Image (cartoon, rainbow, N blue to C red):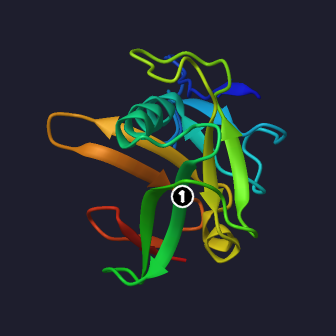
């Protein structure tokens, strides 16, 4: 398992104005890559350390075993932009699922799992739209929930729960 820290840097040069730089949605986040995959690879998905913490806490609360169960991430038709994200816990993977394992030995604050790995299950049809995605968890005064940072999304709705590809 690899941990990758992505950050952006800016120049403080006084001789020339800095070129316009697109805002990187992943700047400052610590990404966790699934076991056996390269960082930022399109053949997988990644999660942030914040998402890992929240998944562990929610799995413990729901009584889902980290050894057998995991978080199912998928898409369904519908929503403002055509496709909607859905997440739920599952007690075991399905036969054709892609299973991604994250966070073995990575400690998070108030970790009820004892730094056990979490598994994310993705069905083959959903994976077409989710390959290369980063799952993050945001907790602010205005909003609390999972964010899907998806390079396959060409348009999304204002709340971020649906997209089109």
Q: Which quadrant is the N terminus positioned in?
A: top right
Q: Can you give x and y, in whole percent of width and height, for residue 140 in the image?
A: 22, 34
Q: Is mark 1 on a helix, strand or loop?
A: strand
Residue at (82%, 40%) from the top-left corner?
38
Residue in front for this viewpoint, 51 or 16: 51
Quarter occupied by residue 101 = top right
Q: In this view, does 105 lie above or below 117?
A: above
Which residue lies under the disc numbered 1?
Answer: 72
Q: Which quadrant is the C terminus positioned in?
A: bottom right
Residue in front for this viewpoint, 22 or 117: 117
Is residue 22 in sight in this rendering? no
Is residue 117 in sight in this rendering? yes
Residue at (47%, 33%) from the top-left corner?
56
> How packed is label 1: few (under 14 Cα within 10 Å), some, or many (20 or more)?
many
Residue in front for this viewpoint, 63 or 146: 63
Is residue 41 left or right of 151 when viewed as pictured? right
**Number of numbered discs overlaid on the protein picture:** 1
Q: Can you give x and y, in whole percent of width and height, for residue 154 in the image?
A: 51, 72
Q: Can you give x and y, in whole percent of width and height, for residue 162 in the image?
A: 38, 71
Residue at (48%, 43%) from the top-left corner?
64
Q: Is residue 128 above or below residue 105?
A: below
Residue at (61%, 19%) from the top-left corner?
106
Quarter occupied by residue 97 = bottom right
Q: In this view, does 55 lie above or below 161?
A: above
Q: Can you give x and y, in whole percent of width and height, for residue 127 in the image?
A: 66, 67
Quarter occupied by residue 143 = top left
């Amino acid at each position: 398992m690899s941990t990758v820290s992505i950050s952006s840097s800016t120049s403080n040069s006084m001789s020339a104005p800095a070129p316009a730089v697109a805002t990187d949605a992943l700047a400052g986040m610590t990404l966790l890559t699934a076991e056996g995959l390269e960082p930022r690879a399109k053949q997988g998905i990644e999660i942030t350390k914040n998402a890992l913490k929240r998944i562990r806490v929610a799995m413990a609360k729901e009584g889902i075993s980290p050894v057998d169960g995991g978080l199912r991430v998928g898409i369904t038709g519908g929503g403002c932009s055509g496709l909607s994200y859905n997440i739920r816990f599952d007690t075991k993977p399905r036969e054709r699922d892609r299973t991604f394992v994250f966070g073995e030995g990575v400690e998070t604050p108030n970790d009820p799992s004892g730094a056990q790995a979490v598994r994310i299950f993705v069905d083959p049809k959903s994976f077409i739209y989710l390959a290369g995605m980063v799952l993050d968890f945001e907790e602010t005064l205005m909003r609390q929930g999972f964010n899907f940072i998806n390079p396959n999304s060409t348009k999304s709705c204002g709340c971020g729960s649906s997209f089109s590809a």
